[in-house]
Amino acid sequence: MHDASGPPPGPVSAAAADPADPAGAPGRAGRAGVLGARRTRRLVGLAALVLALGLTALASVLVGARALSPETVWLALTASAGAEADIIVHDIRLPRTALGLLAGIGLGLGGALMQGHTRNPLGDPSILGVTFGAALAVVLGIALAGVTDLRTQAVLAFTGAALATVIVYAIGSVPGRGPTPITLALAGTAVSWLCYSLVSGLVLLDQATMDNFRFWRVGSLVGRDPEVIVQMLPFFAAGTLLALANAGALNALALGEDTARALGHRVGRARVVGLAAVTLLTGATVAACGPIAFVGLIVPHVARGVVGSDHRWLLPYSALMGAILLLGADVFGRFLAPPGELQVGVVLALVGAPFFIYVVRRRRLLSL
């Protein structure tokens, strides 16, 4: 597979292809040196992102309505005595940070997968109808059964997201060929608007449903039950494994479906694995936090500008950058409206839209 970020094959590659040609040896050595240096840079970049993520997570634990010192947090973790600071660390800050970490990874991976499978630079996880499918399930639960418990709403949201993806896949499948990027995008848009219309009609007709739905609708890491995180953790883990396993097939699909088949990949199975990963990651995120926009749209573009289009590197970079962006936005929102705070979904919309416009105007986006 040709790495889109690397030097194009040229005379050096042609010479290197002939093992009997002595002139090819320096060419092979030079190319191996270039590839080795690029791999080293990417590994250093991954290490830097892991460090940045650790610092952001630490800030998420320390910063809030009541600032905590590192010593106080360390004592709360190692010798908890039930003091107020211990309760803040164990019951509020740590679950909030863990949820932000998982949600950021899920949205970053989901966005990179979605843009890769649909070949659409505006693709994000919601293009499969996941977000509004989850919203419709939550609204139906509130309106028909009076569901207000957050854990039950999370289960409903995940179920709605999964059903919406199955419906989009079925509608977008062309007889004899399976789904294509265009049919998936069109089917996802149609299902999303249908679900959105039903949600709007239900909340407008029932004020009580509107009041209960409003809290879930604003993406937030605040007030989520730690049990919700435990419930969703297996879905995050399965989705992450499927996403990373899908990287090689995505690289082949970027060359065209016929070329992917010639290279031995099963296109239909690759699509199913990719969409299953998107559904698991995004469905679990929406169920736990509500809909959070912009992470899945922005992060893959930034990661692609840093590491290129090779999904073996693009996916882990997107996961780490997504977690850093989401946790950073959550920490930033704690300073914007003292003594309260802005929800992370609002902060990402305020910061993400201008940043995305800046990226589009100042950088040449790499082709998908």
Image: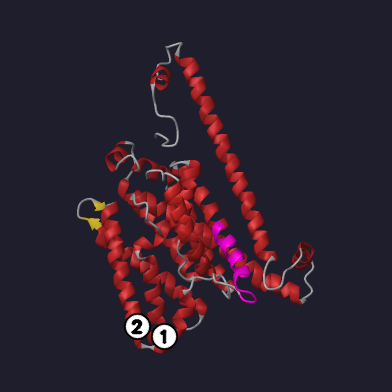
Residue at image coords 43%, 69%: 158
Tell me the kind of residue under disc 2: Leu
Q: Is residue 337 magenta?
A: yes
The location of residue 299, given as percent across then percent down, is 48, 53
Residue highlighted by disc 2: 202
Residue 80 position in % (x across, y down): 77, 71
Q: Amino acid at mark 1?
A: Thr
Horizontally, residue 167 falls left or right of residue 344, namely left
Residue 322 in the image: state x and y as whole percent: 52, 56
Between residue 230 and residue 53, name the one nearer to us.
53
Magenta span: 325-340
Q: Is residue 361 above or below residue 42?
A: below
- Circle 1 crowding by C-alpha within 10 Å: few under 14, some 14–19, many from 20: many
Percent position of residue 267, x then y: 31, 46
Q: Which residue in the structure is indicated by mark 1?
A: 209
Q: Is residue 137 left or right of residue 239?
A: left
- Residue 202 visible within the image: yes
The part of the image, by quadrant, that contains residue 187 is bottom left
**Element on which disc 2 rests:** helix
SS assignment for the magenta stretch, majority: helix
Q: Earlier in the sequence, mark 2 or mark 1?
A: 2
Does 122 sit above or below residue 40? below
SS category of the residue bearing label 1: helix
Q: Quadrant of residue 175?
A: bottom left
User: Which corner quadrant of the image does residue 343 belong to?
Assistant: bottom right
Q: Quadrant of the N terminus?
A: top left
Nearest the viewer among 353 and 230 is 353
